[in-house]
Amino acid sequence: MRLTEQESSLLIEAWSALKNHIPSKDKNKAAEDLVQTMLHASYDMENIYDEFYGLDTYIDRALNYIAEYEESEDDEEEWLDEEWDE
């Protein structure tokens, strides 16, 4: 599912307002939680990346971290499928 322009704007505004109240040591985790929440709501990772990347360093780190994690999970699943087929 793709984020609408209105949804993207609302989430960006909410993050911008809330991050000022989050202690610095917790901002990376909060950004990861925001991205994970969008993914669990069935929004497309590529769309989230397109809409949010470059707007905030914490969100950028979260997107990169989660994208890397998902890619490694996909690689592991492919490896298991290949091993099972042999």
Image: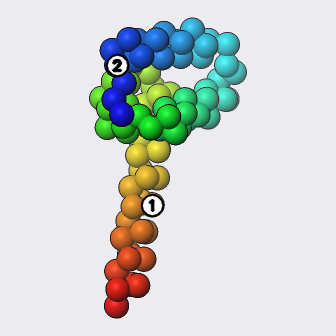
Q: Is residue 65 left or right of residue 5?
A: right
Residue 81 visible (yes or no) = yes
Quadrant of image for the N terminus: top left
Placement of 77 over or under 7, stated as above or below: below
Residue 37 location (% of width, % of height)? 55, 33
Quadrant of image for the C terminus: bottom left
Placement of 69 over or under 34, stated as above or below: below
Q: Residue at x 39, y 84 (%)?
A: 83
Residue 46 location (% of width, % of height)? 31, 37
Placement of 84 over or under 46, stated as above or below: below
Q: Is residue 56 left or right of residue 29?
A: left
Residues packed near mark 2 inside 10 Å, few (<14), some (14 to 19) or many (20 plus)? few
Residue 24 location (% of width, % of height)? 65, 23
Q: Residue at x 33, y 15 (%)?
A: 5
Residue 64 location (% of width, % of height)? 41, 41
* Amino acid type of the residue that numbered disc 2 sits on in the rendered structure: Thr
Residue 62 visible (yes or no) = no
What residue is disc 2 on? 4
Q: Which mark is residue 73?
A: 1
* Mark toward the start of the polypeptide (2 vs 1): 2
Residues packed near mark 1 inside 10 Å, few (<14), some (14 to 19) or many (20 plus)? few
